[in-house]
Image: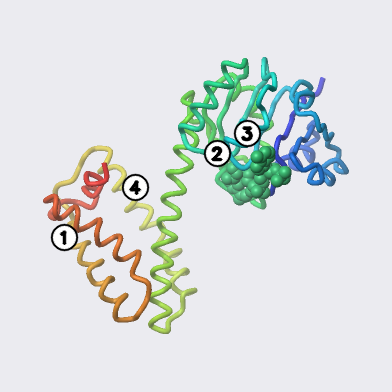
Amino acid sequence: MKEKILMIGLGAMGSVLARLLLEQGKHVTVWNRSEAKAGKLVEAGATFTADIHRAVADSDIILICLLDYPATEQVLTGVSLEGKTVVQLSTGTPQDARSMAASFTERGAAYLDGAILATPSQMGAAETPIFLSGSSAAWKHAEPALRILGGGLKYMGEAPGAASAWDLAALSSMFGMMIGFLNGAGIMESEGMSVADLGQMVRDISPVLGQMIKDTGDDIQEQRYAEPQSSIDICAGTFELMVRLSAENKIDGGFAGFAQQMFRKAQGAGFGQERISALMKTLR
Ligand code: NDP
């Protein structure tokens, strides 16, 4: 008999996930707070069940993609999860994941926590990354269906918080770089130069930037701070210049000032002649 999958949440992401499963011939039931969003999926072969108790009872694998964990708690309050494989794909913190894993496991579910690192239009591709962690039984059960949603699936082990920790750490790296880029864009604009050219240049040097990030990660892991090629004192000078440039060119100095404070704190703690990895000592 065909496995029954329930998709809870038909927002921008959930509706795409349901459609991808339908396109691969899966038996899909959908549930959403606002019924109207189910219309096109029902036309494509999904079943809409308004009663969440019945929708869960009739399904084997429950995929959730709601706004957040509180919305999930709200929707599933009092619903029997006994014997179900539940995969949470809404974004949250590691603590959200641990709390939900404890509560849903106590209610008889095999719980897998997930984090999607892509936009709706990127879903379903061979490389689309989705991180998962939690019950290995749930992973084994849900993996074939999840692989339809993103070929770049990664199971991070039994700790339920691992997937969201990876997700938020990766997002921090990505948005941190994006914010630095926006500051650079301000510099280019204020000098009458092309921001598009800066974007192209950053893309061209991205393997070198990636290697620098990897080396710093290795240094922090190994607690290697001494014998810098480029000391904190030298790097701090960059931000002293950038703060001055912001004033001279009348552009927002928030980013430069934030970074300047980080470096000054490390210098004040006596790490000026150490590697950039030593900044981590002032963040702990
Ligand atoms: P949307 O805002 O498009 O959809 C939100 C969904 O949550 C809707 O189904 C909405 O129902 C439902 N919802 C919100 N509050 C409640 C509630 N109190 N009770 C019941 N249902 C509720 O968001 P997305 O689909 O874009 O995102 C969903 C999750 O996926 C989020 O956690 C997001 O971080 C994550 N994600 C999204 C990505 C993206 O690019 N969009 C990328 C990676 C992860 P209704 O339709 O009735 O309003």
Disc 2 from disc 4: Cα separation: 22 Å
First reached walking from the N terminus: tag 2 or tag 1: 2
| Closer to us: 202 or 239 | 239
Q: Image quadrant for the N terminus?
A: top right
Measured in 3D between alpha carbons, the distance from the residue under mark 1 to the one under mark 3, in whole angstroms, is 48 Å
For residue 115, the mark is: 2
Determine if residue 13 is in view.
Answer: no
Residue 55 is tagged as none
* Residue at 38% over, 53% down: 210
Mark sitting on residue 214: 4
Circle 4 crowding by C-alpha within 10 Å: few under 14, some 14–19, many from 20:
few
232 horizontally vs 88: left or right: left
Q: Secondary structure at mark 3?
A: helix
Front of the two marks 2 and 3? 3
For disc 2, does the CB lie below 8 Å from ligand 1? yes
Q: Amino acid at mark 2?
A: Ala
Q: Which kind of residue does numbered mark 1 sit on?
A: Asp
Cα–Cα gap, marks 2 and 3? 15 Å
Point out the tag, 4 or 3, that comes first from the N-terminus.
Answer: 3
Which of the marked residues, 2 or 4, is nearer the chain's N terminus? 2
Q: Position of residue 105 (x, y in %)?
A: 57, 18
> Residue 279 appears at what percent x and percent y?
23, 50
Q: Residue at x 78, y 27 (%)?
A: 55
Name the residue beneath numbered marker 1: 233
Label 4 element class: helix
Which mark lies nearer to you, 1 or 4? 1
Do tag 1 and tag 3 residues touch (Cβ < 8 Å)?
no
Mark 1 close to ligand 1, CB under 8 Å: no
Residue type at mark 3: give it: Thr
Q: Earlier in the sequence, mark 1 or mark 3?
A: 3
Badge 3, how many Cα within 10 Å: few under 14, some, many 20+? some
Give the labeled residue for mark 3. Answer: 72
